[in-house]
């Protein structure tokens, strides 16, 4: 099965950059579902794009990346070896939860429950 069979590319504008963006969004969605980062080589990208009837090289991507700001939200890094797709696995973790010792946690919960009932500890 070819990717072009299930990727929706607009009929009126089937340029290679639209197909490339659709491919990257599909790969990003798959990586987010698996909670993994995603790095693609240029050989793999060329294969996917050829299956869709388009082509993409490093130089073409570099020019496209500079011209299209929306690609900066899809691709976190690129070099001559390939691209790194911007996924949730690559996003920095937010505030790490603070560990409360179990005895303090139980005490905190007991005080909260007692206050809800109107009593004091």
Image: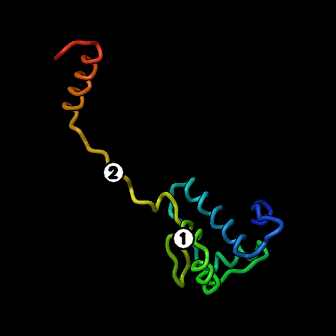
Q: Position of residue 2 (x, y in %)?
A: 78, 66
* Residue sitting at the far bottom: 59
- Quadrant of the frame with the N terminus: bottom right
Disc 1 residue crowd, few under 14, some 14–19, many 20+, Cα 10 Å: few
Mark number displayed over residue 109: none
**Residue at which label 2 appears:** 95
Q: CA–CA distance between discs 1 and 2?
A: 25 Å
Using the image, determine if residue 58 lies above or below residue 90: below
**Residue occupied by mark 1:** 72
Q: Residue at coordinates 19% horizontally, 30% vertically from top-left? A: 103
**Mark 1 / mark 2, whichever is N-terminal:** 1
Image location (x, y in percent) of residue 46: 68, 79
95 lies left or right of 18? left
Tell me what residue is drawn at x 54 percent, y 82 percent: 81
Question: Is 48 on the left-hand or right-hand side of 61?
Answer: right
Residue, far left: 121
Q: Quadrant of residue 54?
A: bottom right
Residue 65 placement: quadrant: bottom right
Residue in view at x 51 percent, y 55 percent: 35
- Secondary structure, mark 1, is helix
* Closest to the observer, 46 or 14: 14
Quadrant of residue 99 within the rendered picture = top left
The answer to which of 20 and 70 lies nearer the viewer is 70
Q: SS at mark 2?
A: loop
């Amino acid at each position: 099965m070819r990717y072009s069979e299930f990727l929706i590319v607009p009929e009126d504008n089937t340029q290679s950059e639209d197909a490339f963006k659709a491919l990257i969004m599909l790969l990003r969605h798959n990586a987010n579902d698996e909670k993994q980062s995603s790095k693609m080589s240029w050989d793999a990208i060329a294969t996917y794009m050829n299956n869709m009837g388009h082509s993409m090289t490093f130089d073409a991507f570099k020019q496209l990346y500079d011209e299209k700001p929306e690609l900066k939200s899809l691709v976190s890094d690129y070099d001559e070896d390939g691209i790194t797709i911007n996924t949730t696995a690559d996003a920095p973790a937010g505030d790490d939860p603070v560990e409360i010792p179990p005895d303090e946690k139980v005490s905190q919960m007991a005080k909260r429950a007692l206050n809800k009932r109107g009593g004091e500890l």
